[in-house]
Image (cartoon, rainbow, N blue to C red):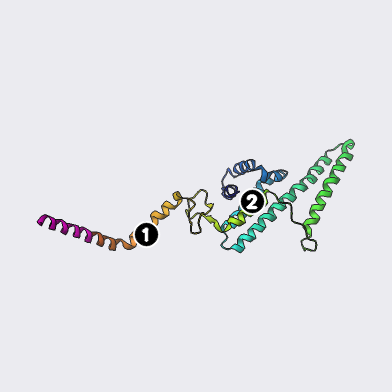
């Protein structure tokens, strides 16, 4: 789950974004199989929309905001699942448009079944006043993903190396600022240069004193 979250949030905004998203979908069918019925590039839009909310959570400065984005992620996934249930209506309408009279009755029955399913979904979505309390949906792999995110949320970090190709990561300690030692090296080098700039004169004086002391000791040894 941690690996999937980090791969998902680090999907880059690049020309090959769609192909990278497709690789992710294929490698984690237990997460994405439910979204397969989305028409056209629907599953790609779902992956990118959830990725953007993961990034918002990663960059959130407080626990409250992280909890909000966890809620929104669950809500988005539920919306996308609901959309898969209405795709059948569109498909049935297209079939009816081109159907012959002999096939019309069969297509009408199929349409009515899909329409009833869609109507149930729409009715559930418009009851937003809360007068009717819907039961919690059955657990699925996406729930496990969000629970993992809630548990690790305080350790979600954005690597401070501006050139990091995968800047979103889970820290192993609360003070960690970089995703890896490789990313930390440039910052450490820069910090050392800044320190040297501030203490250069003082350090040069110390070196000269040490050198002078060493020279005097050598002279004394030669005398003795």
Q: Is residue 29 left or right of residue 129?
A: left
The answer to which of 135 and 29 lies nearer the viewer is 135
Percent across and percent down for residue 18 are: 61, 43
Q: How many marks?
A: 2
The residue that mark 2 highlights is 145
Q: Residue at 89% of width from left, 36% of height from top?
A: 102
Element at label 2 = helix
The answer to which of 61 and 43 lies nearer the viewer is 61
Q: Which mark is residue 194?
A: 1
Most common SS among magenta residues? helix
* Residues shaded magenta: 208-224
Percent across and percent down for residue 33 are: 69, 43
Q: Residue at 63% of width from left, 49% of height from top?
A: 48
Q: CA distance from mark 2 to mark 1?
A: 42 Å
Residue 6 is at least partly visible in this image: yes
Percent across and percent down for residue 128 are: 76, 61
């Amino acid at each position: 789950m941690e690996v999937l979250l980090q791969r998902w949030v680090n999907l880059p905004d690049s020309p090959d974004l769609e192909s990278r998203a497709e690789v992710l979908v294929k490698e984690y069918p237990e997460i994405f199989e439910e979204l397969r019925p989305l028409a056209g590039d629907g599953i790609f839009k779902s992956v990118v929309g959830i990725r953007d909310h993961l990034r918002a959570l990663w960059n959130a400065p407080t626990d409250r905001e992280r909890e909000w984005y966890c809620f929104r992620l669950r809500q988005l996934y539920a919306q996308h699942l609901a959309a898969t249930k209405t795709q059948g209506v569109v498909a049935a309408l297209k079939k009816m448009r081109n159907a012959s009279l002999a096939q019309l009755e069969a297509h009408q029955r199929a349409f009515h079944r899909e329409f009833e399913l869609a109507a149930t979904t729409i009715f559930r979505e418009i009851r937003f006043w809360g007068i009717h309390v819907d039961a919690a949906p059955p657990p699925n792999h996406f729930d496990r993903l969000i629970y993992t995110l809630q548990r690790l949320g305080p350790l979600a970090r954005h690597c401070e190396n501006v050139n990091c190709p995968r800047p979103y990561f889970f820290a192993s300690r609360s003070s960690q600022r970089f995703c890896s030692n490789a990313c930390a090296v440039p910052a450490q080098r820069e910090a050392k240069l800044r320190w040297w700039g501030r203490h250069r004169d003082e350090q040069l004086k110390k070196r000269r004193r040490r050198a002078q002391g060493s020279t005097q000791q050598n002279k004394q040894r030669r005398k003795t």
